Image (tube, rainbow, N blue to C red):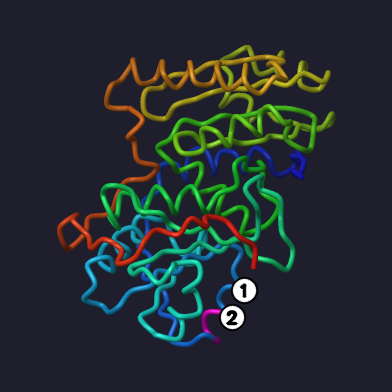
């Protein structure tokens, strides 16, 4: 459920989020080594989202790729980064990894729809593509696994705030959904899930008494903010698609409730971006990739890929 926007904090919040955060630098992530099963269990239970890389040793080429991928993410807050060379830790996750090394698992407290799983962690397993265990593939996987399909704006707590910051910093196009509703509709959720490998989606819940000038001024051109606010207070849903690279922008008021139709419209926007700027193609990375100290070519997994991708503990 998305929290509503409070009038007292909104303007300051939005300017910090949309200006300061978007222009701030990316911090390095050192990561934490898990040397025992006890460490692994504790880290998992105390983190909303945690990634664990499993490697034979520090000499594993995949470990260098993992470090480069980890360094790509801002700070340690959005997702706890951990790794292990310890046999007992590796064996604990053998069922998920099918014994292959290197391996990468993300543990998170929400499911594929973004619903919180209290007291449980959902496991998402990295599946190698043709590039192997390479930093670009790892970054795309980690970014997608760390975020729910739709981010509530503003966030409901510090951990959700960190994930929101990560989504806002992304190079991907953004879909902002302005509505009085406190939960995302089925069509929007389906569309957000379909394109969450190339777009970040946000739900902005607006109350009748909210002063939302900050966000509306950022999303709409003058004098549109006033009429947009009035329309939303009257029950309208407005979707704004924005691209940080090309500057492309599209607005839809009271969009269709049919998921297939909405997906087609969003796909048209994403295609428009690619035509407008060939460099802003489907291969755009979610974040600026940190350089690796070793070549991109990483060691392939030793055993057959696991078919298991998501599972609750």
> Is 181 on the left or on the right of 200, as rendered?
right
Asked if residue 304 is positioned above or below residue 38 in the image, the reply reads: above
Kindly check if marks 1 and 2 are in contact, taking CB atoms under 8 A apart as contact. Answer: yes
Q: Nearer the viewer, residue 218 or 299?
A: 299
Disc 1 to disc 2, C-alpha distance: 6 Å
**Measuring 54% from the left and 44% from the top, which residue is drawn there?**
16
Locate residue 88, reporting x and y percent. 45, 86
**Measuring 52% from the left and 54% from the top, which residue is drawn there?**
146
Disc marking residue 136: none
Disc marking residue 46: 1
Q: Which quadrant holds residue 153?
A: top right
Q: Nearer the viewer, residue 263 or 301?
A: 301
Most extreme residue toward the front is 304
Secondary element at tag 2: helix
Report the magenta stretch's main SS.
Answer: helix
Asked if residue 157 is positioned above or below residue 179 in the image, the reply reads: below
Q: Which residue is mark 2?
A: 42
Q: Which quadrant holds residue 274?
A: top left
For the N terminus, the image quarter is top right
Is residue 245 inside the magenta stretch? no
Asked if residue 148 is positioned above or below residue 214 in the image, the reply reads: below
Locate residue 47, reporting x and y percent. 59, 69
> Is 242 on the left or on the right of 192, as rendered?
left
> Is 147 on the left or on the right of 244, as rendered?
right
Dot 1, how many residues are within 10 Å of its Cα: few (below 14), some (14-19), or many (20+)?
few
Secondary element at tag 1: loop
For the C terminus, the image quarter is bottom right
Asked if residue 43 is positioned above or below residue 107 in the image, the reply reads: below
- What is the magenta range? 38-42
């Amino acid at each position: 459920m998305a929290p509503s926007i409070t009038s007292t904090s909104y303007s300051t919040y939005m300017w910090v989020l949309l200006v300061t955060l978007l222009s701030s630098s990316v911090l390095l992530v050192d990561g934490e080594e898990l040397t025992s099963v006890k460490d692994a269990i504790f880290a998992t239970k105390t983190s909303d989202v945690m990634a664990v890389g499993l490697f034979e040793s520090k000499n594993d080429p995949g470990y260098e790729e993992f470090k480069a991928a980890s360094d790509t993410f801002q700070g340690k807050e959005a997702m706890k980064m951990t790794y292990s060379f310890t046999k007992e830790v590796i064996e604990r996750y053998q069922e998920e990894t099918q014994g292959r090394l290197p391996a990468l698992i993300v543990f998170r407290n929400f499911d594929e729809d973004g619903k919180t799983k209290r007291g449980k962690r959902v496991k998402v397993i990295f599946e190698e593509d043709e590039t192997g265990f390479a930093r670009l593939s790892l970054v795309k996987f980690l970014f997608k696994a760390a975020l729910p399909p739709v981010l509530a704006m503003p966030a409901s707590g510090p951990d959700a705030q960190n994930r929101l910051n990560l989504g806002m910093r992304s190079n991907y196009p953004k879909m902002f959904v302005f509505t009085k509703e406190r939960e995302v509709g089925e069509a929007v959720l389906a569309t957000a899930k379909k394109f969450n490998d190339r777009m970040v989606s946000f739900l902005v819940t607006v109350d009748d008494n909210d002063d939302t000038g900050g966000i509306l001024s950022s999303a709409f051109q003058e004098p549109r903010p006033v009429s947009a606010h009035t329309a939303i207070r009257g029950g309208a849903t407005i979707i704004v698609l924005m691209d940080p690279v090309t500057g492309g922008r599209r607005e839809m008021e009271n969009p269709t409730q049919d998921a297939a139709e909405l997906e087609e419209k969003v796909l048209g926007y994403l295609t428009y971006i690619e035509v407008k700027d060939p460099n802003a193609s489907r291969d755009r990375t979610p974040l600026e990739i940190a350089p690796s100290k070793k070549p991109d070519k990483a060691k392939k997994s030793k055993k057959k890929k696991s078919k298991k991708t998501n599972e609750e503990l």
